[in-house]
Image: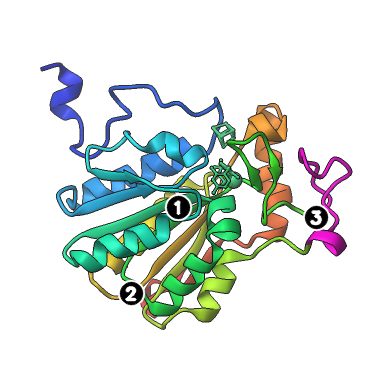
Amino acid sequence: MSASETTMPKSWRLETKPHKFCPGCGHGLVLKVLGQVVDELDIQERAVFGCDIGCSLLAWDFFNIDSVQTHHGRTTPVITGIVRANPSLIGIAYMGDGGGYAIGSQHLVNAANRNDKIFVLLVNNTNYGMTGGQMAPTTLPGQITETTPYGRDVDETGSPTLGPEMVAAISSETAYVARGTVSNMSKLKKFIKRAMENVVAGRGFSFVEVLATCPTNWRTNARDTWKFLDEDMKKYFKVGEFKTLPTEREE
Ligand SMILES: Cc1ncc(C[n+]2csc(CCOP(=O)(O)OP(=O)(O)O)c2C)c(N)n1
Ligand code: SF4
Ligand SMILES: [Mg+2]
Protein backbone atom coordinates (compact mmCIF):
# COMPACT_ATOMS: atom_id res chain seq x y z
CA MET A 1 0.00 0.00 0.00
CA SER A 2 1.42 3.42 -0.99
CA ALA A 3 1.70 6.41 1.35
CA SER A 4 -1.11 8.22 -0.47
CA GLU A 5 -3.43 5.22 0.01
CA THR A 6 -2.82 5.09 3.76
CA THR A 7 -3.69 8.77 4.19
CA MET A 8 -6.45 8.88 1.60
CA PRO A 9 -9.90 9.73 2.95
CA LYS A 10 -12.22 6.79 2.47
CA SER A 11 -14.67 8.58 0.17
CA TRP A 12 -12.33 10.71 -1.93
CA ARG A 13 -10.20 9.27 -4.70
CA LEU A 14 -9.09 12.32 -6.72
CA GLU A 15 -5.71 11.99 -5.03
CA THR A 16 -5.07 8.71 -6.74
CA LYS A 17 -6.41 9.26 -10.23
CA PRO A 18 -6.76 12.26 -12.52
CA HIS A 19 -10.23 13.69 -13.07
CA LYS A 20 -11.65 13.92 -16.57
CA PHE A 21 -12.92 17.50 -16.65
CA CYS A 22 -11.42 20.18 -18.91
CA PRO A 23 -8.65 22.32 -17.36
CA GLY A 24 -10.26 25.12 -15.32
CA CYS A 25 -13.65 23.39 -15.03
CA GLY A 26 -15.68 24.10 -11.88
CA HIS A 27 -17.06 20.56 -11.50
CA GLY A 28 -13.84 19.23 -9.92
CA LEU A 29 -13.84 22.01 -7.30
CA VAL A 30 -17.43 21.31 -6.30
CA LEU A 31 -16.79 17.57 -6.04
CA LYS A 32 -13.65 18.12 -3.98
CA VAL A 33 -15.66 20.02 -1.37
CA LEU A 34 -18.43 17.42 -1.44
CA GLY A 35 -15.89 14.65 -0.84
CA GLN A 36 -14.37 16.56 2.07
CA VAL A 37 -17.78 17.05 3.67
CA VAL A 38 -18.71 13.37 3.32
CA ASP A 39 -15.41 12.51 5.02
CA GLU A 40 -15.84 15.06 7.81
CA LEU A 41 -19.36 13.86 8.59
CA ASP A 42 -18.07 10.27 8.39
CA ILE A 43 -21.08 9.08 6.41
CA GLN A 44 -19.28 7.08 3.70
CA GLU A 45 -21.21 3.92 4.57
CA ARG A 46 -24.61 5.64 4.36
CA ALA A 47 -24.06 8.06 1.48
CA VAL A 48 -25.43 7.34 -2.01
CA PHE A 49 -24.17 9.55 -4.85
CA GLY A 50 -26.28 9.97 -7.97
CA CYS A 51 -25.00 11.87 -11.00
CA ASP A 52 -26.89 13.19 -13.97
CA ILE A 53 -26.11 13.17 -17.68
CA GLY A 54 -23.95 16.16 -18.59
CA CYS A 55 -20.36 16.76 -17.51
CA SER A 56 -21.46 15.71 -14.01
CA LEU A 57 -21.53 12.10 -15.28
CA LEU A 58 -17.73 12.19 -15.37
CA ALA A 59 -17.96 11.90 -11.58
CA TRP A 60 -19.62 8.50 -11.61
CA ASP A 61 -16.52 6.69 -10.32
CA PHE A 62 -14.77 9.42 -8.29
CA PHE A 63 -16.05 8.42 -4.89
CA ASN A 64 -15.55 5.22 -3.04
CA ILE A 65 -19.22 5.26 -2.02
CA ASP A 66 -22.32 3.71 -3.60
CA SER A 67 -23.00 5.62 -6.81
CA VAL A 68 -25.59 5.59 -9.56
CA GLN A 69 -25.55 7.18 -13.01
CA THR A 70 -29.04 8.26 -14.10
CA HIS A 71 -30.75 9.63 -17.22
CA HIS A 72 -30.60 13.34 -18.07
CA GLY A 73 -32.70 15.27 -15.54
CA ARG A 74 -33.73 12.18 -13.56
CA THR A 75 -31.22 12.12 -10.73
CA THR A 76 -33.53 13.79 -8.21
CA PRO A 77 -36.34 11.18 -8.49
CA VAL A 78 -33.84 8.29 -8.57
CA ILE A 79 -32.23 9.48 -5.33
CA THR A 80 -35.66 10.19 -3.80
CA GLY A 81 -36.71 6.60 -4.61
CA ILE A 82 -33.54 5.10 -3.13
CA VAL A 83 -33.93 7.06 0.11
CA ARG A 84 -37.64 6.27 0.38
CA ALA A 85 -36.82 2.57 -0.01
CA ASN A 86 -34.11 2.84 2.67
CA PRO A 87 -34.46 5.99 4.80
CA SER A 88 -31.19 5.27 6.64
CA LEU A 89 -29.28 6.29 3.47
CA ILE A 90 -28.04 9.83 2.78
CA GLY A 91 -28.98 10.68 -0.81
CA ILE A 92 -26.98 13.17 -2.91
CA ALA A 93 -28.28 14.15 -6.37
CA TYR A 94 -25.56 15.87 -8.45
CA MET A 95 -26.44 17.62 -11.72
CA GLY A 96 -25.93 20.52 -14.10
CA ASP A 97 -28.18 23.50 -14.70
CA GLY A 98 -29.58 21.92 -17.88
CA GLY A 99 -30.43 18.72 -16.04
CA GLY A 100 -31.86 20.47 -12.99
CA TYR A 101 -33.66 23.49 -14.46
CA ALA A 102 -34.72 22.30 -17.94
CA ILE A 103 -35.50 18.61 -18.46
CA GLY A 104 -35.53 17.87 -14.70
CA SER A 105 -37.23 21.02 -13.43
CA GLN A 106 -40.47 19.29 -12.49
CA HIS A 107 -38.53 16.80 -10.35
CA LEU A 108 -36.76 19.61 -8.49
CA VAL A 109 -40.05 21.43 -7.86
CA ASN A 110 -41.82 18.30 -6.65
CA ALA A 111 -38.99 17.06 -4.42
CA ALA A 112 -38.72 20.52 -2.82
CA ASN A 113 -42.47 20.71 -2.40
CA ARG A 114 -42.62 17.22 -0.80
CA ASN A 115 -39.70 18.15 1.46
CA ASP A 116 -37.87 14.98 0.41
CA LYS A 117 -34.94 14.39 2.78
CA ILE A 118 -32.30 14.45 0.03
CA PHE A 119 -29.51 16.84 -1.01
CA VAL A 120 -29.65 18.26 -4.55
CA LEU A 121 -26.31 19.81 -5.62
CA LEU A 122 -26.56 21.71 -8.92
CA VAL A 123 -23.69 23.18 -10.96
CA ASN A 124 -24.61 26.41 -12.78
CA ASN A 125 -22.18 27.07 -15.63
CA THR A 126 -24.72 28.97 -17.77
CA ASN A 127 -24.74 26.41 -20.58
CA TYR A 128 -25.14 22.81 -21.69
CA GLY A 129 -21.48 21.96 -21.22
CA MET A 130 -21.24 18.36 -22.32
CA THR A 131 -23.07 18.79 -25.62
CA GLY A 132 -20.98 21.73 -26.81
CA GLY A 133 -22.26 24.88 -25.12
CA GLN A 134 -25.89 25.41 -26.05
CA MET A 135 -28.17 27.86 -24.21
CA ALA A 136 -29.35 26.63 -20.80
CA PRO A 137 -32.10 28.07 -18.55
CA THR A 138 -29.30 29.94 -16.72
CA THR A 139 -27.70 31.57 -19.78
CA LEU A 140 -27.32 35.30 -19.07
CA PRO A 141 -29.20 37.95 -21.06
CA GLY A 142 -27.10 38.76 -24.13
CA GLN A 143 -24.74 35.79 -23.56
CA ILE A 144 -23.42 34.18 -26.73
CA THR A 145 -23.73 30.39 -26.90
CA GLU A 146 -23.84 27.83 -29.72
CA THR A 147 -27.61 28.33 -30.02
CA THR A 148 -27.68 32.07 -29.27
CA PRO A 149 -24.99 33.36 -31.66
CA TYR A 150 -26.34 36.94 -31.36
CA GLY A 151 -26.72 36.72 -27.55
CA ARG A 152 -29.63 35.41 -25.49
CA ASP A 153 -32.79 37.38 -26.22
CA VAL A 154 -34.89 37.26 -23.05
CA ASP A 155 -37.98 38.50 -24.92
CA GLU A 156 -37.84 35.33 -26.97
CA THR A 157 -36.44 32.76 -24.51
CA GLY A 158 -37.35 34.09 -21.05
CA SER A 159 -35.06 35.23 -18.26
CA PRO A 160 -32.41 33.07 -16.54
CA THR A 161 -33.82 30.67 -13.96
CA LEU A 162 -33.22 31.73 -10.37
CA GLY A 163 -33.16 28.25 -8.86
CA PRO A 164 -32.48 28.80 -5.15
CA GLU A 165 -34.95 31.70 -5.08
CA MET A 166 -37.61 29.42 -6.62
CA VAL A 167 -36.84 26.47 -4.32
CA ALA A 168 -36.85 28.73 -1.25
CA ALA A 169 -40.29 30.00 -2.23
CA ILE A 170 -41.89 26.56 -2.56
CA SER A 171 -40.06 24.49 0.07
CA SER A 172 -40.79 23.79 3.72
CA GLU A 173 -39.39 25.87 6.59
CA THR A 174 -37.06 22.97 7.40
CA ALA A 175 -35.43 23.07 3.95
CA TYR A 176 -31.86 24.34 3.47
CA VAL A 177 -31.31 26.47 0.34
CA ALA A 178 -28.18 28.34 -0.78
CA ARG A 179 -26.14 29.52 -3.75
CA GLY A 180 -22.35 29.28 -3.56
CA THR A 181 -19.52 29.85 -6.01
CA VAL A 182 -16.26 28.10 -6.81
CA SER A 183 -14.56 31.48 -6.39
CA ASN A 184 -15.17 31.25 -2.62
CA MET A 185 -14.39 27.68 -1.61
CA SER A 186 -14.56 28.18 2.16
CA LYS A 187 -18.08 29.63 1.93
CA LEU A 188 -19.06 26.91 -0.54
CA LYS A 189 -17.88 24.26 1.88
CA LYS A 190 -19.89 25.85 4.69
CA PHE A 191 -23.03 25.78 2.55
CA ILE A 192 -22.52 22.18 1.39
CA LYS A 193 -21.81 21.06 4.95
CA ARG A 194 -24.98 22.71 6.29
CA ALA A 195 -26.99 21.19 3.44
CA MET A 196 -25.64 17.73 4.25
CA GLU A 197 -26.16 18.17 7.99
CA ASN A 198 -29.78 19.12 7.32
CA VAL A 199 -30.30 15.84 5.46
CA VAL A 200 -28.29 13.74 7.93
CA ALA A 201 -30.51 15.13 10.73
CA GLY A 202 -33.58 14.06 8.71
CA ARG A 203 -34.73 17.65 8.97
CA GLY A 204 -35.64 18.49 5.37
CA PHE A 205 -34.85 18.99 1.70
CA SER A 206 -31.47 20.57 0.92
CA PHE A 207 -30.53 22.44 -2.23
CA VAL A 208 -27.27 24.18 -3.18
CA GLU A 209 -26.61 25.78 -6.57
CA VAL A 210 -22.96 26.50 -7.34
CA LEU A 211 -21.74 29.15 -9.79
CA ALA A 212 -19.03 27.33 -11.72
CA THR A 213 -16.63 27.80 -14.61
CA CYS A 214 -16.79 26.28 -18.10
CA PRO A 215 -13.86 27.85 -19.96
CA THR A 216 -14.15 25.40 -22.85
CA ASN A 217 -17.60 26.57 -23.92
CA TRP A 218 -17.22 30.14 -22.71
CA ARG A 219 -14.05 30.19 -24.87
CA THR A 220 -12.28 32.22 -22.21
CA ASN A 221 -8.69 32.35 -20.99
CA ALA A 222 -8.02 32.02 -17.25
CA ARG A 223 -8.42 35.73 -16.47
CA ASP A 224 -11.65 36.16 -18.46
CA THR A 225 -13.06 32.93 -17.01
CA TRP A 226 -12.88 34.27 -13.45
CA LYS A 227 -14.05 37.70 -14.60
CA PHE A 228 -17.18 36.18 -16.17
CA LEU A 229 -17.84 34.14 -13.00
CA ASP A 230 -17.22 36.92 -10.50
CA GLU A 231 -18.60 39.89 -12.39
CA ASP A 232 -21.17 38.87 -15.02
CA MET A 233 -22.69 35.84 -13.26
CA LYS A 234 -22.70 37.40 -9.79
CA LYS A 235 -24.57 40.45 -11.10
CA TYR A 236 -27.50 38.17 -11.83
CA PHE A 237 -27.11 35.30 -9.36
CA LYS A 238 -26.92 36.33 -5.70
CA VAL A 239 -24.54 34.24 -3.56
CA GLY A 240 -25.79 33.47 -0.06
CA GLU A 241 -28.21 31.41 2.00
CA PHE A 242 -31.91 31.58 1.23
CA LYS A 243 -33.17 29.16 3.89
CA THR A 244 -31.25 27.98 6.93
CA LEU A 245 -31.48 27.82 10.71
CA PRO A 246 -31.71 31.42 12.00
CA THR A 247 -28.57 30.93 14.10
CA GLU A 248 -26.59 29.88 11.01
CA ARG A 249 -27.61 32.68 8.69
CA GLU A 250 -24.79 33.99 6.48
CA GLU A 251 -25.02 36.39 3.50
C1 LIG B 1 -33.20 12.68 -22.45
C2 LIG B 1 -31.95 13.34 -22.95
N1 LIG B 1 -32.05 14.52 -23.60
C3 LIG B 1 -30.94 15.13 -24.06
C4 LIG B 1 -29.70 14.56 -23.85
C5 LIG B 1 -28.47 15.24 -24.41
N2 LIG B 1 -27.70 15.90 -23.38
C6 LIG B 1 -26.64 15.29 -22.79
S1 LIG B 1 -25.86 16.27 -21.70
C7 LIG B 1 -26.94 17.54 -22.00
C8 LIG B 1 -26.81 18.90 -21.36
C9 LIG B 1 -25.99 18.93 -20.14
O1 LIG B 1 -25.97 20.24 -19.61
P1 LIG B 1 -26.01 20.47 -18.06
O2 LIG B 1 -27.07 19.64 -17.45
O3 LIG B 1 -26.06 21.92 -17.82
O4 LIG B 1 -24.62 19.87 -17.56
P2 LIG B 1 -23.11 20.38 -17.86
O5 LIG B 1 -22.60 19.48 -18.92
O6 LIG B 1 -23.19 21.80 -18.27
O7 LIG B 1 -22.42 20.21 -16.55
C10 LIG B 1 -27.90 17.18 -22.96
C11 LIG B 1 -28.97 18.07 -23.47
C12 LIG B 1 -29.65 13.33 -23.17
N3 LIG B 1 -28.47 12.73 -22.88
N4 LIG B 1 -30.79 12.75 -22.72
S1 SF4 C 1 -17.25 21.29 -21.14
FE1 SF4 C 1 -17.32 22.82 -19.48
S2 SF4 C 1 -18.47 21.81 -17.80
FE2 SF4 C 1 -17.78 20.21 -19.23
S3 SF4 C 1 -15.83 19.44 -18.40
FE3 SF4 C 1 -15.36 21.04 -19.93
S4 SF4 C 1 -15.19 22.96 -18.75
FE4 SF4 C 1 -16.27 21.45 -17.45
MG1 LIG D 1 -24.49 23.30 -17.47
The answer to whether residue 16 is left or right of residue 128 is left
Q: Amino acid at mark 3?
A: Pro
Residue 10 in percent (x, y) is at 18, 37
Mark 2 to mark 3 CA distance (whole Å): 33 Å
Residue 147 included in the magenta stretch of the image:
yes
Q: Secondary structure at mark 2?
A: loop
Residue that extends furthest to the left in the rendered view of this protein: 1
Q: Secondary structure at mark 3?
A: loop
Q: Which residues are magenta?
A: 141-157
The answer to whether residue 146 is left or right of residue 167 is right
Query: In the rendered image, which residue does mark 2 sit on?
Result: 204
What mark, if any, has residue 188 been given in the picture?
1
Q: Quadrant of residue 91?
A: bottom left
Quarter of the image containing the N terminus?
top left
**Residue depicted at x 26% and y 51%:** 48
Q: Nearer the viewer, residue 24 or 95?
A: 95
Q: Magenta stretch: dominant SS?
A: loop
Q: Amino acid at mark 2?
A: Gly
What mark, if any, has residue 141 been given in the picture?
3
Residue 161 in percent (x, y) is at 66, 63
Mark 1 to mark 2 CA distance (whole Å): 20 Å
Residue that extends furthest to the front in the rendered view of this protein: 71
Looking at the image, tell me whether mark 2 or mark 3 is earlier in sequence order. Answer: 3
Q: Vertical placement of 209 versus 35: above or below? A: below
Q: Secondary structure at mark 1?
A: helix
